[in-house]
Image (cartoon, rainbow, N blue to C red):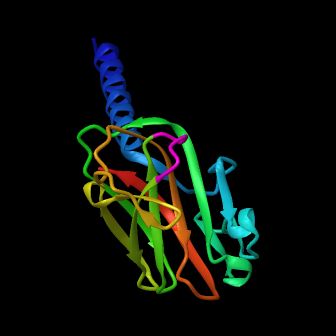
Amino acid sequence: MKNNILGLSVLFSIVIVACSLTSENMNSIFNFSQSAKINNWKVVNDDVMGGISSSTFELNRDGDAEFKGTVSTANNGGFASVRYRFRAKDIAGKKTISIRLKGDSKPYQFRVKSKATDYYSYITTFSTLGDWETIQINLKDLYPSFRGNKLNKENFNESSIEEISFLIANKKNESFKLIIDKIEIN
C-alpha cells in the first residue's frame, strides 16, 4: 500500500510538471538560452536591393539573442532585419505578444505574418528604454504593410502565425543593438 501511494505521488508530480511545461510551451514563440537553436532565424538587410546595411544575430554569453549592426541609407538602403519562420502556431483567442528585451533607446518594428508566403506583414513600431523591459503588443493593433506602405486591408485578425521579425529602419545612418530574452503570446 505504501509503495502504491508513493508511486501515485511521483506520477502526480510528473503530470503536474508536464502540464506546466506544456502550458508554458503553448504560449512561447521563442525562449532564448545557451542551448537555443537559432539557425531558423535569418538576417535580411537592405543589401537584397543594393543597400549596404549590415547586421548579425547570435546568442551572447548570457544566452540572450543579440540583433546588432549598422544601418546605412547609402544606395537607397536603410534597413536591417531578422526573421523567424516556424510551423503554423494556433493563436486563436490570444490577444497580445509579450517580448522581454533590452534595447538601445531606438525604435524598432515588430512584424508578424499569418502565412510565411504572404507578400505583406502586419507591423507595429515600439520604442526601447535602454534597459530590460517587457513590451506588450496588441495583435489587433498590427496593421498590414508592404515595403513601408500601409495597405488598405484590415488590421491583424488571424488565427495563426508562421513568421515574426524585428526590423530597424529609422531613415538615418546608425548603429543598433537589440537584446531579446523571450517572445510569448497570451
Q: How many marks?
A: 0
Query: Image quadrant for the N terminus?
Result: top left
Residue at coordinates 49% horizontally, 67% vertically from top-left?
148
Give residue 172's quadrant in the image: bottom right
Q: As drawn, is 63 to the left or to the right of 99?
A: right
Give residue 96's quadrant in the image: bottom left
Residue at coordinates 53% horizontally, 63% vertically from top-left?
147
| Residue 85: x %, y % from top left | 57, 45
Residue at coordinates 31% horizontally, 33% vertically from top-left?
16
The prevailing secondary structure element of the residues shown in magenta is: loop
| Residue 28: x %, y % from top left | 42, 47
Extent of the magenta region? 115-120
Q: Is residue 121 above or below residue 166?
A: above
Q: As drawn, is 92 to the left or to the right of 56?
A: left
Q: Is residue 43 above or below residue 118?
A: below
| Residue 48: x %, y % from top left | 73, 62
Which of 3/19 is in front? 19
Which of 25/153 is in front? 153
